[in-house]
Amino acid sequence: MVKLSLKSTPALALICWTLMLSACGGGASSGDKGAAGNASILNALDSSTTSPSKLPDGKDSVSLSSFWETQVLNGFSRVGVLRGYAYQDFRNLDIKATAVSNTTDGKSTVLLIQHPDHFAQSGDLVTLTGLSKDLLDIPFVNLNSTFTITSRDANAYFITVPYATKRRDTFALTANFYYKYKECEGVQTVVQTPALSTVPVTFFDGYEARVAKHTVENAVSGCSPSERSFTSYKYYAVNNPKYGASLNYPFIGQSVDGGDFASLDKTFDLPTSTVQSGQSGSIGTMKFYKSSNKRVLVGTSFLSYEILSHTANSVFIVMTTTNYNDFDNLVSTMTEVYGRNPTTDKDYKLIRTTVKYNNPRRNEVVIE
């Protein structure tokens, strides 16, 4: 079971608390279809991680400042499918494997892997590396790969290797085993109201501010807690505090109901001119405190952007938030990827959020 932090600013609460350029989904929400509604653009994104050189450069010029101003004034909502994972490595593991059978199409071999206390369930993934010789006539290159696990019991499971051998022996296997466990899944709903001026006027860190209410609701199975809601209030400067800056309504901070207080340590900044493939830069630095008096620092987040080019007529916008605790130790890294399918999408939309935790099980949360 994934134990997600119950602090007032856990990673699930942090998701979408700052960047949300096209509305953390925004007006272009993926809706209740989740990843299914963005299948083609997600496939292009995944392909970019394995074969970026085979994909043509993007041609779009993107205005990040226009995206930002739109989401501040209009608010947004998004529903995403949430999945939680954990990772565990076993290096130079000595185990026994048995060639059980061939698949019905005769093209692959089913191996029984005997690994005591492997903790994997059907559908989890295992990656084998370090093999340098053929086994039972199976070329080692076919064994150095990632396989979907079919669980048998706590001490053994099956994998299917894409090579057919007629031999049915048990043999010793020494390799590195890297497991990816799926631990929970569910739905996350994010809603932010339009940022409005208030009467009387609201000031935040001395600046007149517009205020938006931001709620995150997580309903998951297998995670702890199974249901969790977070409410925060976000503040946007009516006038840009940076001399000469033209970005409208820059983010200046937030307060979490029953939790922490955060403000910009440095000016929130987005390019006012259009950006293109390959550009990157810093957005700002957030400081988290126990209360608005800012006496007790509890963490720091660094915000940045990068424009990736992967498809003929669109680019991917990647927003990164790197979170540290009060001892400057890395806690988590969150990436938000925005994309646009030129055949179906008019605007860019959030297609995937990933939070990677720097803990012993390297927990990971993916929302699509």
Image: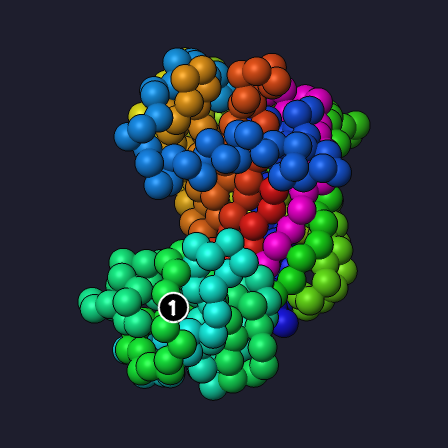
Q: How many marks?
A: 1
Q: Residue at x 32, y 58 (%)?
A: 142
Report the coloring of the rendering: rainbow
Image position of 354 (left or right of 174)? right
Q: Residue at x 60, y 46 (%)?
A: 367
Q: Quadrant of residue 109?
A: bottom left
Of the residues shown, which amino acid type is indicated by label 1?
Lys
Furthest toward the right, the residue is 199
Q: Residue at x 76, y 60 (%)?
A: 227
- Which sits in the foreground, 11 or 219? 219
- Residue 193 within the segment the image draws in magenta: no
Q: Residue at x 28, y 71 (%)?
A: 135
Residues shaded magenta: 69-85
Give the secondary structure at mark 1: loop
The answer to whether residue 247 is seen in the rendering is no
- Which sits in the foreground, 12 or 29? 29
Q: Residues within 10 Å of mark 1 (few under 14, many from 20)?
A: few
- For label 1, the residue is 166
Q: Quadrant of residue 136?
A: bottom left
Image height of 152 relative to 332, above or below: below
Furthest toward the front, the residue is 166
Please identify the quadrant where the C terminus is shown: top right
- Which sits in the foreground, 41 or 317? 41
Image height of 112 relative to 231, above or below: below
The answer to whether residue 102 is seen in the rendering is yes
Q: Position of residue 150 (x, y in %)?
A: 56, 68
- Which sits in the foreground, 319 or 184? 184
- Residue 83 within the segment the image draws in magenta: yes
Q: Position of residue 338 (x, y in %)?
A: 52, 31
Q: Position of residue 69 (x, y in %)?
A: 59, 20
Image position of 62 (left or right of 293)? left
